[in-house]
Amino acid sequence: MFQIRSVQEILAPFANMQVSLSRHMRNKLSTVPLDIIRLVDVLQMLAGQELAAEMVFEDDKGDNLYCEDEHLKNNYVQIAANGQGDAWLMNRMDGNLSFFDHSLTQPKVTALFIDFWQFLQLADLIHQYEEWIDQVKDFEESDLAGQLGSCLRMLHPDLPEHYPFAFV
């Protein structure tokens, strides 16, 4: 039902899209321990694109809510948002993703324990899940949430528990 697709498969529809990233974001990305050239290329493809609900990729210009916290401002770069003030942040030291919830006081971020490439796979799985929800007649009787949870565990064993949204 759900398939963990390769990054190349996920990015194929966006191959001809390119939006320049701000100097601010490029500077913040320069410290991330990933293939920076490929990372910037992919983020330029995805800027402004919604891979799944709650996952809209965007350029971090330094004016986002997470920047109000000095620790977060210095140690993270925002790569996507959910449109409600929350954000998907990449740790600049290890390249792992966290979720920033603007309504929480402590902790403000929840670590997902996945890297950027796994985050793309997560977004794609959520997108597949959203498509199946629209086709299922009786969601309560289906095991969609359980099947999605199994796939998320393949990305990281604790990902379903750390994912910030309920599968309903």
Image (tube, helix red, strand yellow):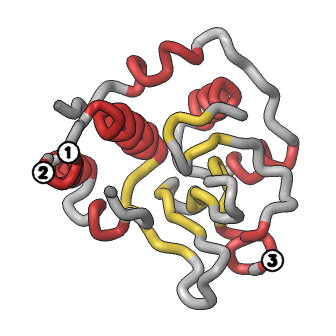
Vertical arrangement, residue 137 with respect to residue 66, above or below? above
Q: Are marks 2 and 1 in contact (CB under 8 Å)?
A: yes
Q: Is residue 37 visible?
A: no
Amino acid type of the residue tagged 1 in the rendering = Asp
As drawn, is 66 to the left or to the right of 158?
right
Mark 2 element type: helix
Vertical arrangement, residue 145 with respect to residue 1, above or below? below
Write the residue at 79% across / 70% down.
67
Write the residue at 78% across / 25% down.
19
Numbered circle sitting on residue 68: 3
Numbered circle sitting on residue 157: none
- Label 3 neighbour load within 10 Å: few <14, some 14-19, many 20+: few
Quadrant into which the N terminus falls: top left
Amino acid type of the residue tagged 3 in the rendering = Glu
Which callout, 1 or 3, points to the residue nearer the camera? 1
Residue 20: x and y, percent?
81, 28
Question: Badge 2 is on which residue?
Answer: 141
Amino acid type of the residue tagged 2 in the rendering = Glu
Question: Badge 1 is on which residue?
Answer: 138
